[in-house]
Amino acid sequence: MENITTDTQIHGYSIKRVFSLLLLLAISTVSFAQSGLSTDSKKAKKLYEKADKKYKERDFLTAISYLEESVRQDSEFFEAYIRMGSLYNAMGQEDSVYSKFQLYEKTALDPIASVLERLAFMAFDRGEYGKAESFLNKFLVKVPERESSRDIDLLIRSIRFAKKELKKPVDSIELKILPSEVNRFKLQYLPSITVDNASMFFTKRDYVQGDEDIVVSHFVDGKWTPAESISPRINSSLNEGACAVSADGRTMIFTSCDGKYSLGSCDLYITRKVGDNWSKPKNLGKPINSRYWESQPSLSADGKTLYFSSNRTGGLGGRDIWVSKSADGKWSVPINLGGDVNTPKDETTPFIHPNGSDLYFSANSYPGMGGYDLFVSSKTDSLWSIPRNLGFPINTFKDEVAIIIGAEGQMAYFAKEEQKNFEILDSKIVSITLPKEIRPDPVSYNIGRVTDKETLIPLKAEVEIIDLNTNKVIYRNESDSLTGSYLMIVPAGLELAAYVKKKGYLYSDFHFTTQTNKVSEPDTINIKLKPISEGESLILKNIYFDIDSYEIKKKSISELDNAYQLLIENPDMIVEIAGHTDDIGSKNYNQQLSEKRAGAVYDMLTSKGISRSRISFKGYADLQPLLPNTTDSNRKSNRRIEFRVLRVNQ
């Protein structure tokens, strides 16, 4: 959104506050008194005197009309121009302020420095970068020591950046307004989208100063459905907006302001979708919320990491980006992202891409096109890169303060406003195909249902994705308790293991490798979990050995950890670890290899504390193939380690 200024959004651009000081300076510097006025026209002076009287009566419109008449008598009467500019500022008419101050600068023999400074910022705010540079240079001639000040230095670097950006070809970049089914309100902004691009949630208002509500539109049969209220449990007579959803669309965190149970001016609330219904929202409470302002949340794909903006104490500036992680249903104390991202000014509206590494946000603290621009910073391990401006035409001289990007990394959505005199007329959600240089690493996803193998009853189970090369969990979530449906994120360019687990059942596991910078087509994988019972078996699909070796490779750690946890959670289960080979090699060799591999797994589990009385191991060579040993693919499936449940002690 470019400049929405409600409680859940960005407050007005801080430059306007600077001009309040300038107004006082202008009024005190240029007196309404006639002595020392630049005009020789008696009529112009008389009109100026009448304007003074009306000004003291607080009749600004009549005062301006007299001043307009005075400059018709003498077009070089510069005191009248600066006086009109000051009066228009008091009335909040910025375009008129800019017009009159320019006429003052043009006619005054020696314009005061503060007006030149203000003109430089006002020109920059309007995207008139050449004028901004000219006014700024004239100002610095008068006050050269200000060149190194933080605000002037930022303006200098921003003008250079903006002029460079405007020279880039942008013919291939096109903003597309989403259809009227989405843009059906006076204002719509701050979109959030599920990883399958099937549901878009956003904030709407029916008129500029109206109540904020959260609405949703679904993409069905190639079309967006009419946006409608997400739930009467969520929307109320208060402001609800600035929402974020997890990749599967079943966890939402949103902002509500001035509520009965709020800790501060705006707090973050959580709601979960079970089946087709959203739960009653719950204030996240401490340590997430405080007596300050917390808003503009963004959730990681699995809903376990929360980024948000806040002006709470302990930050680096006005509004900073903070992060918290959820474990065992509790959110950790938020951590400030630090100086790699945050600055003494404002950083807001974070969006963490489903890849978990690329963070997009809005800031007025880095060189940009004007006001708030959109930036991206990428995380490697725990370090964030230097933020990079998304450039023109995504950023303009207006305020751009929120963007979301699809899982595939190409399509972005954000809100664009229509303004007049810096007042918002309306806003619409638009889409754009991102240039390659600012695209995040893409991700895909798999979907399906988890059911009991015997009864086909839907199950609530944990779904976990592990990067086999780092053994780090990159996604963890749960299937829906009513439908059993799940979604798992699949990043590009990684070798991954997936585990689906529920107590009382043998877990299900599989392995897949994704190509770098290429999004695979989503797969539907339905999981049927086997209840733990005598005779059931589990293939450990993520146990790896080199050819002709029984030394377990490091990327097998996640499988061993899950096998260990299965035994710990089910202490009455007695299992055999069975080793199998393909038919290549002699019978004796395959027998020894299968037995040694099974023994290696046995040794690892007993070394972790599993009693030797609960597990045994045996090699079966190539005597129990799953598939005919006729192809390389079949042989690969036949080379395996298997858990067999021998009995379950009662």
Image (spheres, rainbow, N blue to C red):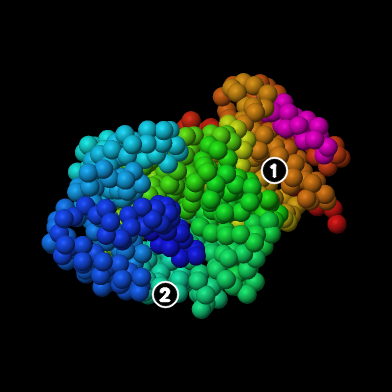
Location of residue 116 in the rendering, given as x and y in whole percent from the top left corner: 31, 45
Residue 565: quadrant of the picture:
top right
Residue nearer the viewer, 614 or 183: 183
Number of numbered markers: 2
Location of residue 293 in the rendering, given as x and y in whole percent from the top left corner: 57, 60
> Is 371 inside the magenta-drawn segment?
no
Residue nearer the viewer, 185 or 303: 185
Report, in whole angstroms, how far the alpha carbon at label 1 lies from the one at label 2. Answer: 52 Å
Residue at 31% of width from left, 71% of height from top?
53
Residue 42 vertical position relative to residue 279 in the rendered view, above or below: above
Q: Residues within 10 Å of mark 2 (few under 14, many from 20)?
A: few
Residue 101 vertical position relative to residue 216 in the rendered view, above or below: above
Residue at 52% of width from left, 75% of height from top?
238
> Is 605 inside the magenta-drawn segment?
yes
**How would you classify the magenta stretch by its main secondary structure?**
helix
| Callout 1 amino acid | Asn
Question: Which segment did they paint magenta?
Answer: 593-610
| Callout 2 amino acid | Gly
* Label number found at residue 562: 1
The quadrant of the picture occupied by the C terminus is bottom right
The quadrant of the picture occupied by the N terminus is bottom left
Q: Which residue is mark 2?
A: 210
Residue at 67% of width from left, 34% of height from top?
557
> From this viewpoint, is residue 413 visible?
no
Location of residue 517 in the rendering, given as x and y in whole percent from the top left corner: 40, 36
